[in-house]
């Protein structure tokens, strides 16, 4: 199966008071098109930094990132805009990712309008996206503070889908939601993956969620990937000491 993402020897070092801290330490992995890949580990292990490197929010200190076989580390201008059409991110706090002064509908339409789509066409597509994420048309007029966290996260997923990306990165996208709503969002992501052939990189610390949704899982510890495999095998028969500790802390 064709690869959507290839990470090779990726590295990121931060400095605090001139003291280096290696957040991402020479990691390599790949994703196939249509795959859901889980990236798990405790807070501070480098998961979110990895997402920010892939999405160009921060620059790496070494390594390579290929999307659809194309190196993206040095892309700028128009090429960078094209990258963001291929890769979209859904964040942990959905309300914070929307402009509080604009309605959810306007937020979803923004990327489409920026690509030159006419307003009427963008509005029609926005309404279609709301239906896809199981929100009623009336939510187009609501503001982020007027809806629940789960409803806002559904709108954030609709916004991510608006540019027809090939890869969606969900960075702790359910951790701020209650358990019932988490299950609903996971079910929604699974359905969208199947129906649209989406590739999803699911970054989280919830192993049960990963087991329910992901085809493969990577376990990250202190900036390195220490174990990988099929979720049932990694969770049921972990090989590394850290993975065992992580599983025992959850189950």
Image (tube, rainbow, N blue to C red):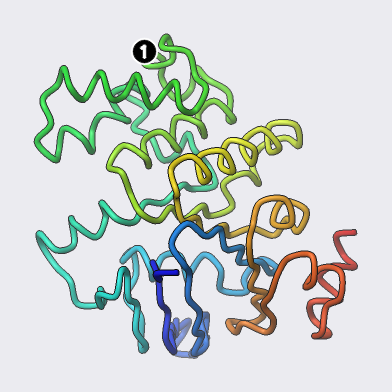
Dot 1: few (<14), some (14–19), or many (≥20) neighbours within 10 Å? few
For the C terminus, the quadrant is bottom right
| Place of residue 108 in the rendered image (x, y in percent of width and height, measured from the top left) | 32, 30
* 4 up-or-down from 141: above or below: below
Query: So how many labels did they put on this image?
Result: 1
| Place of residue 211 in the rendered image (x, y in percent of width and height, measured from the top left) | 74, 57
Residue that sits furthest to the front in the current view: 1
| Place of residue 224 in the rendered image (x, y in percent of width and height, measured from the top left) | 60, 84
From the viewer's perspective, is 69 left or right of 51? Answer: left
Residue at 58 percent across and 23 percent down: it is 148
Q: Secondary structure at mark 1?
A: helix
Residue that sits furthest to the top in the current view: 138
* 54 up-or-down from 62: above or below: above
From the viewer's perspective, is 127 left or right of 31? Answer: left
Residue at 19 percent across and 77 percent down: it is 74
For the N terminus, the quadrant is bottom left
* The quarter of the displayed image where residue 87 is located: bottom left
Q: Tell which of 94 and 119 is nearer to you.
A: 119
Q: Tell which of 240 and 45 is nearer to you.
A: 240
> Which residue is label 1 attached to?
141
């Amino acid at each position: 199966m064709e690869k959507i993402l290839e990470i090779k020897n990726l590295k990121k070092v931060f400095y605090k008071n001139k003291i280096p801290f290696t957040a991402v330490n020479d990691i390599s992995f790949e994703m196939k098109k249509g795959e859901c890949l889980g990236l798990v580990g405790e807070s501070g292990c480098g998961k979110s930094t990895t997402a920010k490197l892939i999405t160009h929010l921060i620059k790496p200190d070494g390594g390579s990132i290929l999307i659809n076989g194309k190196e993206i580390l040095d892309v700028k201008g128009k090429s960078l805009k094209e990258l963001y059409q291929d890769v979209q991110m859904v964040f942990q706090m959905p309300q914070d990712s929307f402009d509080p002064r604009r309605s959810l509908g306007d937020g979803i339409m923004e990327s489409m309008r920026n690509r030159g789509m006419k307003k009427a066409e963008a509005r029609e597509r926005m309404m279609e996206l709301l239906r896809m994420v199981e929100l009623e048309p009336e939510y187009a007029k609501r503001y982020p503070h007027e809806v629940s966290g789960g409803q806002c996260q559904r709108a954030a997923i609709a916004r991510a889908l608006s540019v027809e990306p090939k890869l969606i990165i969900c960075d702790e996208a359910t951790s701020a939601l209650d358990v019932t709503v988490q299950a609903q969002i996971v079910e929604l992501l699974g359905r969208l993956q199947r129906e649209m052939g989406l590739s999803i990189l699911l970054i989280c610390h919830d192993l049960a969620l990963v087991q329910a949704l992901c085809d493969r899982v990577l376990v990250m510890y202190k900036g390195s990937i220490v174990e990988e495999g099929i979720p049932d095998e990694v969770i049921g028969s972990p090989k590394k000491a850290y993975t065992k500790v992580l599983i025992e802390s959850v189950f």
